[in-house]
Image: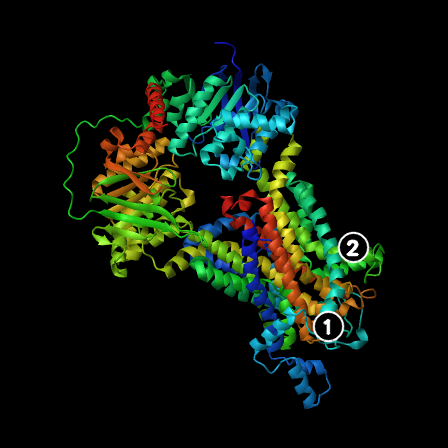
Amino acid sequence: MAAPVLQIRDLRVEFRQKKDWREVVHGVSLDVGRGEVLALVGESGSGKSTIAMSIPGLLPRNGRNSGSIQLDGQELIGASPGTLRKIRGRQVAVIFQEPMRALNPVYTIGWQIREMLQAHQELSKEQARERAVELLKLVDIPEPERRVDSYPHQLSGGQRQRAMIAQALALDPQVLIADEPTTALDVTVQGEILELLHDLKGRIDASILLITHDMGVVADLADRIVVLKDGAIVEQGDAHQIFYDPQQPYTQSLLKAVLSLSLEPVAAELPAPEPAETPAFDLDHGVIEYPGGRGRKPFRAIDDVTLRLDAGQVMGLVGESGSGKSTIGRAAVGLLPLASGALRINGLDLVTADAGQLREARRQVAMVFQDAGASVNPRWPIGQAIAEPLQLHTDLDAAARDARVTELLDRVQLSRNLRNRFPHQLSGGQRQRVGIARALALQPSLLIVDEPTSALDVSVQEKVLELFAELQEEFGFACLFITHDLAVVEHVADRIAVLRHGKLVETGTTAEVLMSPQDSYTRRLIAAVPVPDPREQAQRRRQRRELLGEAS
Amino acid sequence: MIRYIGRRLLMALPVLLGTSFLIFAMVYALPGDPIRALAGDQPLPPEVIAQLRAEHNLDDPLLLQYLKYLAQLFQGNLGTDFAGNPVSETIALRLPITARLAIVAIIFEIIFGITAGVLCALYKNSWFDNLVLVSTTMVVSVPVFVLAFLAQWLLGFQLGWFPVAGIANGWFSLILPGLVLAALSMAYVARLTRTSMAETLGADHVRTARSKGISELRVVTRHGLRNALIPVVTFIGADLGAMMGGAIVTESVFNIPGIGRAVFDAVRNQEGPVVVGIVTMMVFFFIFFNLVVDVLYGVLDPRIRYE
Amino acid sequence: MSDELPTPTGVRPGGPDSGAEHELLDLVEENIEQATLWGEAWKTLRRNPMFLIGGVIAVLMTLIAVFPSLFAGGVDPRDCDLTDARQWPSAAHWFGTDLQGCDYYANVIHGARISLSIGLLSVVGTMVLAVILGTLAGYFGGLTDSLLSRFTDIFYGVPLLLGAMILLTVTEERSVFTVSLALSIFGWMTAMRLVRSSVITVKNADFVAAAQALAATTRQILTRHIMPNAISPVVSFMTIAMGGFIASEATLTFLGIGLQAPEISWGLQINVGQSRFSSAPYLVFFPALFLSLTVMAFMLMGDALRDALDPDRN
């Protein structure tokens, strides 16, 4: 291998908290070769972003680092601000996550790209603008001449990320740091951005330092992988070695915890259950609208959707943002009214039911929210939060409620001592367990689960999903499982419904939908999911290109 | 944008009417007797009282009185004070003085408030930051009239730097009252700028700007200050609208014959038409400047402009 | 106007009032669930020198207001001897004597009660109006919100001092109660907007949706979920507002429109003293000092309280 473009030796990063310095990166050494994609992988708190931000000297003010970072032989640690400034943008450029926040909202994207160019090159305004248009073309933004004058909020999420990438590429940097470049994006958009990065990899000379928690993204792009845990390197090696022959137990468990879309036929297809007389959830030509502002038309979030969920079944409700999947969930618990159609819970139509019947129906349905921390009153200890449904819907006295809360805490494997804690004192996984315990308090026959694991690290996600599967089996509730993550759905759902722009695209058993999708959108959705397996991902990439070729 | 302004204007109209009615109702409908107040201590003959009541429509129901007043108002007639001078004349005479005072005050707010706030945000927890924190706390704690009094005594009488009262020296006479009028808002502007600037400097897009290798000065001004000033500018705009109300105390202490002084005197003499006329005009300006602020907001923030 | 304005009006910087502090302590004892949350804020506050300074002054002023004769050393502020008029501060008369020869120290001490009573009454009045109207507007939204917000705008157009001035002039009755009433009537609008936006934020939180999904009644949702969570920004604001009201009362009185003799009030003392300022500056100095310290105490506490209750802090 030729001399690495970037050489990091014994990098230590500390942050000051009050008066103490706390070390969060403990002597990391790694090389980035010319033109290679090196992925830094790890769960939250592993220090992956901190390491990357040390390179261009962009640590927060309360941070400091020591050790050595050499870019093409030039030492960056301890370099003067002026030196670092010349390196930033020109030699080391950064693609940040969440371009909505990473781009300045008050300037056009053209202005922002121009600023980058003019900081390092003598260019007239016109020349810089021309170059900006070229760059936007490079990242496949449609109508670049027009888009160059758009403000960030006028672009879609994918276009914003493309603009961000264009800006980073403006000066042909030697090292491109991509910090979770696809995390905030929808699956199909993520697919497109990955495709772009993959494509760019061949067209530009830059080495890419990829920071991500998504093993699918890693499998798609990385040449080499560095696995981090708690600020230290656990293991590093080339992508195939890490994926197919991980040496360290931590790497093995990390990979095992990642759910992947296996798309393997289920060994023995279960016989389709006899349709029960009354489905647990039955949406019949449902239309749900959000009122528009003055004079504007109401926004139709759900448009003529018919869905049926039998008792004891788990249905995955899949779609991207704006598909209306959460809207259906909210309507099922009575938070949104139907504009037309019928919504029956255990045979009772919520549209025509009287107040008393509705109250009874609400007992039968419970919801687990995406952000479990936000779904319980921050001023209540979790014991009280879990007891709230009991208080509202049963005649149990305080002692009986307490006993029931204890029982529920046990069921979701939370320590009984936690009952007096406040939500903000719990970890993400614990909070999600609280959300589940609370939802199960009244033993509902239908559970609505909205993206319960999307904010969690993979190892925590694995445990929460395991718990969910166990409880579902034990209590036998029907469940609408709302998620954007096809891999999660494949693991928990009996049936899948795919939504797009408020319309039902496709529905069927999990195997049917994932193995032989009928609709082209479903096919694209499935193809866009990167799987944490480099070989298979490479193959899927080829298939995806064919699929898109078909479409165009 | 035009529609946005139009909608704002449409919303402003009922508020303007509502506020002027509120003032009108307070002045004419509450237990006090405007005629008796007019007479002072001397009892008036009943026929004179009756004539005065008729003249001011005081025997009509309140709403009718108000409508008659409005009708007059639309003809440009704001009524007359007890001495028989048209209220509009008083306003025309007094308003320019207060306007000049307000301009002086706004300049102080902008120069000192924003500068102090920016420096505080850049050098957080430094001695300067603490100094500003302490001094702004003191400024907001000392009531304006005490502050006015102090400034008058110290800078006027003791040091003799500025004239202490009146407007004989043109703009120069307005420096001291302008400073006092601005003091409170200056403290808020400093704090608001500090908070807003600190928040902006911590934003993701500022980190992006740094990652581009542009100079620190440019990061702070074009990315930090440009975004951080949005709430500050709107605050100052709204404050300009509220300044006439704030001028009451300052103009009284410094004996400046502006609109604040005029309304104060009118209230004390219970000259109903003058009070209602001037306050209605104040509210008009208040609403007008808030409208300007809304538009300004749109100009400064493209996310609102292209709503 | 423009309720979307980035609180231009607003937020006077400052600290908690004695009322809020007592309330805070009560909460700690009565409500276990709130104990921890307020307890956490308390932990932060305890270490904040600004809060401590403000707190000590506020407590002291409150004590003075409640037991003035104790602090005045039994001297009757109205027991005057004209032959002693206008004496400079001395061992016999710490703050000197006023134009009628009354002991000025006793007078200044006795002035605390009026200021604090009016501050407290105005805050209570404002709070009642703001919480009721703000909660209704924020929670129900739609037409209710539009109407209540326009109603607020109407009052918002009248400057506090001017409105109170007119009201007090036409009613011709100047008591602690009427002054507080006038200040409340023209001082509640910013607090109402604060409550409204605070309620809207909380209303959209998932835990409220969760309670709605459980078919909790509107009253249960408002009292158990929304109000307790929406109240913290209001508490710090009202603490600051307490300082503002005290200053406003003094200003009105100073202008000759608030309280009148024989009431004992700092504003009145400053008003009388100003004409003799060059010969007897202490006549203005002492009441102005007490007034400013009191206002500052609440501003400091409100400021500290706001920082401590800031949800972003966690």
Q: Position of residue A212 (x, y in %)?
A: 43, 27
Query: The residue marked by circle 2 belongs to what chain?
Result: B
Give above or below for A74 relative to C158: above
On screen, residue A366 versus residue A42, left or right, reads: left
Q: Where does the image place residue C291, in percent across and percent down from the top left?
A: 68, 62
- In the image, is A298 to the left or to the right of B281? left
Q: Which residue is mark 2?
A: B175
Q: Nearer the viewer, mark 1 or mark 2?
A: 1
Question: Which of the image's four quarters has the N terminus of chain C?
Answer: bottom right
Check disc 1 and give the amino acid type: Pro
Q: Residue C254, which numbered label?
A: none
Chain hosting mark 1: B
Label 2 CA crowd tier, 10 Å (few <14, some 14–19, many 20+): some
Assign a secondary structure to mark 2. helix
Q: In the shown orientation, is residue C245 left or right of residue A318?
A: right
Q: Position of residue A139 (x, y in %)?
A: 48, 26
Specify which label sits upstream in the sequence, 1 or 2.
Answer: 1
Q: Quadrant of residue A530?
A: top left
